[in-house]
Image (cartoon, grey):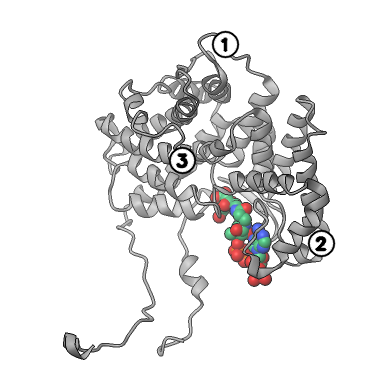
């Protein structure tokens, strides 16, 4: 009650944006990219086709796909100066801190693609960002390991190149496993866009000031870092490690009691969603990939994965979670797959940012391309003090 009228605080956090890119029906558990169901895209397309779809509003023909993939491949290297930015960080800096800095720093190298209101600049910066994110994420990882950076290899696929830059060394070339390459490509597809989530709204609001595309994407990286959003996959794995440390499956009952106790503040990370009040369709696809990767790597018996399965079972059967529609979300399974691939937990959100970059760019370009767009200015409902005069200091 503000004295003027009662309002729903939730309204201010869900003011509508108009977009033609991604459609979600939270009740039906439906997700469409430019009209195509995510299930079909995950089955019949790869990430490069999905990028083309999100950016240009349709799937590429074979020759368009070849041309687009080649363009991305030819922009995967970063300026050699970028490595000096990394040296400013502690080796144990969180990769998302490094990535936020590196992505923003890109704007200082590419003056031919910083004018967000120039369609050519938007197109070039889009290709550069999609191409360079895997290189930057892998550089953040190598820096934290004290290992030399691996240059991208043009003969590899987008996902294969990322695995090579992450796990290859000058002494030992990395053998890209098709199962892991496919699993990573699917993680990229499933995380590519998700309509007006927190980080996408951040990118839109930031870009609406006319700042350069690299700065707007850096703002999205910073927002995605939060544990309630993209940081959930890292938080979900840390939660599993914590339960494991307290005794694993035998202690799961105690943990669930904490989650049900509102005062504990303990949440089931990787479960629940602001929009999906049915199952997150991405989670189903990610669960499938998770089982394939665990089988390929012979990890089905791994205690942490058994613990994850036990938690999933409880969330799908226990009334407390069923009534609150707290199903596993995409982050729950993507964290498990990434751990199986060997990606360190701290890098999970960096992988999410890598995948979501194309969605952020598509949403930003959609807004900037609309001649009606203006700088964003969210409204507020004032609930503070009425007008009053300043009392002298000795009367306060
Ligand atoms: C992503 O927006 C997007 O699209 C995001 C994303 C994307 O692709 O961009 O999908 C990616 O961010 C997925 C979500 C990842 N986050 C997590 O997994 C973190 C854990 N989840 C929670 O923080 C939570 O579920 C949210 C933030 C995701 C949603 O929170 P809401 O909007 O408060 O959920 P709700 O209103 O549906 O909650 C209903 C009830 C509430 O309890 P009651 O007041 O009814 O008693 O369930 C509770 C909530 O407190 N609840 C949880 C819970 N999530 C909600 N209780 C325990 N564990 C949880 N995870």
310 relative to 185, above or below = below
Q: Is residue 354 visible?
A: yes
Mark linked to residue 96: 3
Q: Distance between the Cα atoms at labels 2 and 3?
A: 35 Å
Q: Are marks 3 and 1 in contact (CB under 8 Å)?
A: no
Q: Is residue 37 visible?
A: no
Badge 1 density bin: few <14, some 14–19, many ≥20, Cα 10 Å? few
Q: Nearer the viewer, residue 195 or 68?
A: 195
Residue found at x 40% / y 88%:
4
Q: Position of residue 5 (x, y in %)?
A: 44, 87
Q: Position of residue 285 (x, y in %)?
A: 71, 41
Badge 2 density bin: few <14, some 14–19, many ≥20, Cα 10 Å? few
Image quarter of residue 279: bottom right
In the picture of the structure, the residue carrying the numbered disc 1 is 173
Is 153 situated left or right of 266 in this image? left
Is 25 situated left or right of 383 in this image? right
Please tell me in which quarter of the rendered image ligand 1 is found.
Answer: bottom right
Residue found at x 54% / y 45%:
193
Q: Position of residue 173 (x, y in %)?
A: 57, 11
Q: Are marks 2 and 3 in contact (CB under 8 Å)?
A: no
Q: Earlier in the sequence, mark 2 or mark 3?
A: 3
Mark 3, secondary structure of its residue: helix
Mark 1, secondary structure of its residue: loop
Quadrant occupied by the C terminus: bottom left
Mark linked to residue 318: 2
Q: Distance between the Cα atoms at labels 3 and 1?
A: 27 Å
Residue found at x 64% / y 60%:
266
Q: Nearer the viewer, residue 101 or 393?
A: 393
């Amino acid at each position: 009650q503000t004295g003027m009228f009662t309002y729903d605080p939730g309204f201010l956090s869900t003011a509508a944006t108009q977009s033609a890119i991604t459609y979600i029906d939270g009740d039906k558990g439906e997700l469409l990219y430019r009209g195509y169901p995510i299930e079909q895209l995950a089955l019949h397309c790869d990430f490069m086709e999905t990028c083309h779809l999100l950016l240009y509003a349709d799937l590429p023909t074979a020759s368009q796909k070849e041309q687009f993939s080649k363009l991305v491949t030819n922009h995967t290297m970063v300026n050699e100066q970028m490595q000096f930015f990394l040296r400013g960080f502690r080796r144990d800096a969180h990769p998302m801190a490094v990535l936020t800095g590196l992505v923003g720093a890109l704007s200082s190298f590419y003056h031919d693609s910083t004018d967000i209101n120039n369609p050519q600049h938007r197109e070039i910066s889009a290709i550069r960002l999609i191409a360079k994110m895997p290189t930057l994420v892998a550089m953040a990882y190598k820096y934290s390991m004290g290992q030399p950076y691996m240059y991208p290899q043009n003969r590899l696929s987008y996902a294969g190149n990322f695995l090579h830059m992450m796990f290859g060394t000058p002494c030992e070339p990395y053998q890209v496993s098709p199962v892991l390459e496919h699993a990573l490509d699917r993680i990229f597809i499933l995380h590519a866009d998700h309509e007006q989530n927190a980080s996408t709204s951040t990118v839109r609001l930031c870009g609406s000031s006319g700042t350069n595309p690299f700065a707007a994407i850096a703002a999205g990286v910073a927002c995605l870092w939060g544990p309630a959003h993209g940081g959930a996959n890292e938080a979900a794995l840390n939660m599993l490690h914590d339960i494991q440390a307290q005794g694993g499956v035998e202690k799961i009952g105690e943990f669930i009691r904490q989650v049900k106790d509102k005062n504990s503040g303990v949440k089931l990370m990787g479960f629940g969603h602001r929009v999906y009040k049915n199952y997150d369709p991405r989670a189903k696809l990610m669960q499938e990939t998770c089982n394939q990767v665990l089988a390929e790597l012979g990890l089905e018996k791994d205690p942490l994965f058994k613990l994850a399965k036990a938690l999933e079972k409880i969330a799908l059967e226990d009334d407390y979670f069923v009534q609150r529609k707290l199903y596993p979300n995409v982050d729950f399974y993507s964290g498990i797959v990434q751990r199986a691939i060997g990606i360190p937990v701290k890098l999970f959100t960096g992988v999410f940012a890598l995948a979501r970059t194309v969605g952020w760019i598509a949403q930003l370009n959609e807004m900037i391309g609309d001649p009606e767009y203006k700088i964003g200015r969210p409204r507020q409902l004032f609930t503070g003090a009425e007008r009053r005069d300043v009392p002298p200091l000795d009367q306060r």
